[in-house]
Image (cartoon, rainbow, N blue to C red):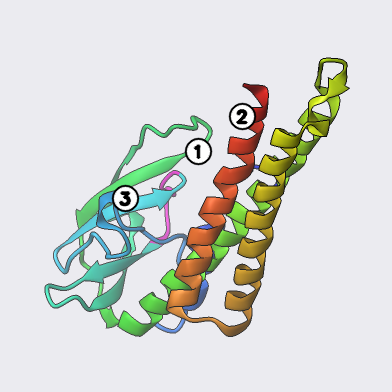
Amino acid sequence: QGRSLLNSDSLASVLLAELASVVAGPVDGIVLPEVADGYQPSSDADRVRGILLGPIPSTGRLAIPVSSPTGTVSIGVVDVDTLEAERLDTFDPSAHWSRVSGPMNGELVDASTPWRHAIAAAHRALATELVALADEALRIAVEHVSVRTQFGAPIGSFQSPRHLLADAAAALEGARSLLGTTWRYGGDLSALSAKAAAGRAHQTPSDADRKSVV
């Protein structure tokens, strides 16, 4: 997905795989927290509120992570025909995100530990996508400096672009190594660190390419 820039519900699938033990029966998606709420579910015991990746299905059920005043997390399942949805205005018009709301009328099951594991799995998945994006961006940057000429020579032969691309390659390999470690050993902190490193590595090739153009 990272290399192809496709939109999919892969993130929802990763979360649901970790929550399978506390989700009653098959579901067609999961309502994610609002962006401003970070990792804490936006829904509470009375009302569903959050973001769905993709349009809301015409029929089916959605898993709803629910936050309590004490900070614990539960999971409920709600029929989609009890919910309302509006399409969000996203930066990429091909990405369809829906804000959903409605009554929380499903039975709640304690899921604090599975939710924590699901968030760690989501961090690993997003880090993997970011590393793939960074790898592709670096490939494009190297290709660009190899074909663009200045003063009769490819700009990739000059010291400044080469240093920038070397820094980008080092950041990418560091992120890839950290990501491999967190996939092998798991853990909340390592997953969060891998996502942060992947995010930084994702920025570096783009910065190098932009500076080489300038």
180 vs 33, nearest the viewer = 180
Specify which label sits upstream in the sequence, 3 or 2. 3
Give the prevailing secondary structure in the magenta stretch: loop
State the residue position of label 1: 95
- Look at label 1 and name its amino acid: Ala
Mark number for residue 35?
Answer: 3
Left or right: 111, with 55 as reference point: left
State the residue position of label 2: 211
Circle 2: element type: helix
3 in relation to 128, above or below = above
How many numbered badges does the structure rendering display?
Answer: 3
Residue 87 seen in render: yes
Left or right: 21, with 135 as reference point: left
Q: In the rendered structure, are the residues bearing label 2 and label 1 in contact, judged by CB atoms less than 8 Å apart?
A: no
Q: Nearer the viewer, mark 2 or mark 1?
A: 2
Read off the magenta span: 55-61
Q: Examine the image and state in which quarter residue 9 appears.
A: bottom right
Q: Residue furthest front?
A: 159
State the residue at coordinates (54%, 81%). Answer: 186
* Residue 134, x across and y down, in percent: 65, 48
- Look at label 2 and name its amino acid: Lys
Q: Examine the image and state in which quarter residue 158 appears.
A: top right
Q: In the rendered structure, are the residues bearing label 3 and label 1 in contact, judged by CB atoms less than 8 Å apart?
A: no
Q: CA distance from mark 2 to mark 1?
A: 29 Å
Circle 1: element type: loop
Quadrant, the C terminus: top right
